[in-house]
Image: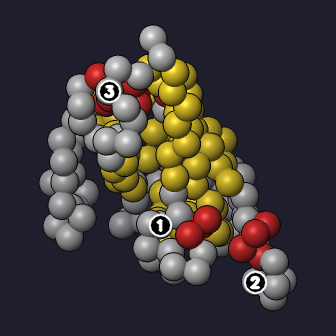
Amino acid sequence: HPLNIQNQGHMGDWPCVARTYITFPLSAVPAGKLIRSAKLVMRQMGGSNPADAVFSMIQVLTVSEDWNEATITWNNAPLAKENVAITRVEVVDPDWTDPNVLQNLPSITWDVSRAAQAAVTAQAPLRLALYSSDWGSGVGINTGKYFYSSEADDYIPFLRPKLVIEYVDP
């Protein structure tokens, strides 16, 4: 299941607006450690109409509440607490005939160090929402950027979103 992060300036294309919610448990970080670095890394697999698309600025926001993946909607999703990172995401149009296409997909990275430290301090998981406020190209369309989800097949775990943490003693 791909993750879609997208906004539209052309309201006639509604409902082409999508944000993504993701949670990382932080129980593997030993008690009393400080987060030196935390990077959210996602593999981009494509996007809306690459021939007409432009880059997007994708934001990462913290979320304080849990949600249910099976029932979350645009209208009942928890509100964002704080915008903690933004990264420029280029248009990708992979050559799916290339036998090495999966290894060559770009890794997109956001620095979420401060948010991860706050979650560790609160003894809570790191809950994030990813959103793009882009207008889009031409008439405000084709902003979608697609990423692999945690449901990537077992034989390609390197495509799943990951949180890379470096911690230190205080």
Front position among marks 1 and 2: 1
Q: Position of residue 124 (x, y in %)?
A: 24, 36
Question: What residue is at 47 percent from the left and 24 percent from the top?
Answer: 35
Pick whichever, 155 or 11, lies toward us: 155
The residue lying at 64 percent from left, 69 percent from top is 45
The foreground one among 20 and 114 is 114
- Above or below, 147 relative to 128: below
Instruction: Kindly report the distance in space between the C-alpha atoms of the residues bearing marks 1 and 2.
Output: 18 Å
Q: Amino acid at mark 2?
A: Trp
Q: Earlier in the sequence, mark 1 or mark 2?
A: 2
Q: Are marks 1 and 2 in contact (CB under 8 Å)?
A: no
**Rendered view: 95 above or below 71:** below
Residue occupying image coordinates x 38% and y 42%? 28
* 83 is higher (above) or lower (below) than 169: below
Q: Nearer the viewer, residue 28 or 147?
A: 28
Lower sequence index among marks 3 and 2: 3
Q: Which mark is residue 96?
A: 2
Colour approach in the figure: secondary structure
Residue 94, position as x, y percentages in the image: 76, 73
